Image (cartoon, rainbow, N blue to C red):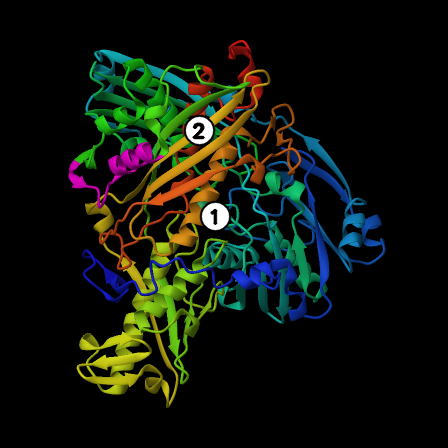
Amino acid sequence: MKFETPAQDNPVDQLKVVGRPHDRIDGPLKTTGTAPYAYEWHDEVDKVAYGYVIGSAIAKGRITSVDTRAAKNAPGVLSVITADNAGKLGKGEMNAATLLGGPTIEHYHQAIGVVVAETFEQARAAAALVEVNYQRERGAWDLAEEKPGVTTPPEDTPDKKVGDFDRAFDSAAVQFDATYTTPDQSHMAMEPHASMAVWEGEKLTLWTTNQMINWCHSDLAKTLNIPQENIRVRSPYIGGGFGGKLFLRSDALLAALGARAIQRPVKVMLTRPMIPNNTTHRPATIQRVRIGADESGHISAIAHESWNGNLPGGPTETATNQTELLYAGANRLTGLRLAKLDLPEGNSMRAPGEAPGMMVLEIAMDEMAEKLGIDPVEFRILNDTQVDPANPERPFSQRQLIECLRTGAEHFGWQQRNPTPAQVRDGRWLVGMGMAAGFRNNLVTPSGARVRLDAHGTVTVETDMTDIGTGSYTIIAQTAAEMMGVPIEKVVVKLGDSTFPISSGSGGQWGGNSSTAGVYAACVKLREAVADRLGIDASSAMFTDEQVRVGERSIPLREAAAQSELVAEDKIEFGDLAEKYQQSTFAGHFVEVAVDSATGEVRVRRMLAVCAAGRILNPKTARSQVIGAMTMGLGAALMEELAVDTRLGFFVNHDMAGYEVPVHADVPQQEVIFLDETDPISSPMKAKGVGELGICGVSAAIANAIYNATGVRVRDYPITLDKLLHGLPDPV
Ligand code: MOS
């Protein structure tokens, strides 16, 4: 199905199942520990062996020798695989560094081998016996040091200019110019990267944990130099991804190589301390924002430049995305700069681009509002735009930013905020409020699905879509139930298998809307097949209460499949509506913090997000996504940072003792309000992404609340107490 014109009324609009706060249908499996994760499919096969990954101990240079003799002779060891005996490997489209390094080393903890043994403990013990000698080289590991040398944009991301920024900024009555930093961050999904590989002759089955089955599938074939049809990838349950599992990673490749070497199933899990340096991370940025406005606060000039570093072939962090679109202003400049760094590959982490971009832009807006003497909510509203500022012919499909901000301010009690910093005390605590806009683009991606109807009237959906903890199973079931007129209990959803039609996968907050739109398309076909079987006209048939109704006639749905199962497959494909209209999602974030006036400890007291993100397919799972994202934004504001050792080139705090993420005690109260909205430009579901919107802006709202509480403006994330202490007012 081609989606080329705005959606009309369709069966989803009935909202009998869609739009309701259904519990997750996979919930009982998750809460009883019976949803098998990648490392837990051992019941499927016999005699599973364990692989333990060896990571490079240097960040750049060469392996001069590897001695595996002691390891091979260790108890239980079945094989030791390194680049020397792995055979010729290719490289995946989506990988910057090779997944099995050697002799050249591209980054610290790059996998250089896997020890396969009867037990995990034997593999781990033997891995310690592998003797590797290196020739260490000096690399580029410090973004701040590399930055001055990087003044031109990467070829694929030229600067974007509207009007004449320099002139408008120079002549602006009020000017603001500041530079900020965001650190490297790790996804820290609860489930580590893990895979189990089984070969039968030439055929490989890989159980893994991956957000994008098709990317994993094609890159594994490329890396192993075998035809894609010889590989089956299965990833039906995933314990969090956040972008860290978008790609084929070393666990999958090494499980496949290990299993091939010993002709037995092999599973490989990356240990927690391997993950930050072995896999991808969100790259650190240095960002400069300049804003020029007239005395009344109308922005005339806005510029945002962002620097990040990466390995050759690694992406640029598009931290200026939102600055192209969020506020009005006739003169604009956005630019990206990419330095070559020899740190592990930087890549997508929840809301790549906007998450770090909003961390900065929305502090800058707060600072500018203060400079102008305007309330920060009003300053944003004053500079709202309903069209793409670079192309005024191009409207937003929906844009309720003002409504988000007004609703949030009202609901949160914003008028009680004292705009003068460091005035409000609660015992030893300094109390403050902060806010920020939320913004994340809405992306749409082709997505396929197959639906079946059987003689019991059960509808089965098959798609390679994944559920990374987001609720995909549930919204897909809701969609199929709505379309076929059956209760949700009569829908079976099968996900995460490369034998199913290729879906959007889970990434970029496109998965919910795109994958359900694919299921919608397949269900339209199935309805036609049903009508055909029953000898009725599909367009006038109503599918409801497990019946197909035409006029006075009512036929049980299952009768259409009485003779044989009905199967339909289709794919949603998007036309140029995304070019004609700007599709984005919006929020207002409001936060209250308390800062200990003696120690600088920050406690977030209340958080509110008001979101406008198209139709909310399931308010319960959507709310969970948003509060999860708000929590992640809190982590980014206050604690998350991969500390770079700039002498040796690696992330030092590569475990969950050193890399802190928020826990329940860090988040006392969170509230989410969804504005009533449908977006017929986005898809037949009229939904948009929401899972990444929730993180975009939160950290800045916290930073702004800390400033309001203390009078200390911190421009370098995370805002740890050492950055506050020097400026705290005297304790009373
Ligand atoms: Mo998302 S960072 O594309 O999983």
What distance separates the C-alpha of mark 2 from that of mark 1?
Answer: 40 Å
Give the left or right position of residue 161, taking residue 281 as reference: left
* Tag of residue 94: 1
Residue 549 x %, y %: 23, 80
Tell me the SS state at disc 1.
Answer: loop
Residue type, label 1? Met
Residue lying furthest left in this view?
Answer: 393
Q: Quadrant of residue 696?
A: top left
Query: Which three-letter amino acid code belongs to the residue tagged 2?
Result: Glu
Residue found 33% across the figure and 23% down from its top: 365
The residue positioned 42% from the left and 66% from the top of the image is 463
**Reading the chain from its start, which is encountered first: label 2 or label 1?**
1
Question: Is residue 50 something that shows in the picture?
Answer: yes
In this view of the protein, which residue sits in the foreground, 251 or 288?
A: 288
Please, what secondary structure does the residue beneath circle 2 have?
Answer: strand
Per the image, the residue denoted by label 2 is 592
The correct choice, above or below, for 236 with respect to 83 in the image is below
Q: Residue 81, percent across and down?
A: 71, 53
Numbered mark located on residue 296 in the image: none
Depth check, front residue: 362 or 324: 362
- Looking at the image, the residue that sits furthest to the front is 427
Write down the region rendered in magenta.
392-411
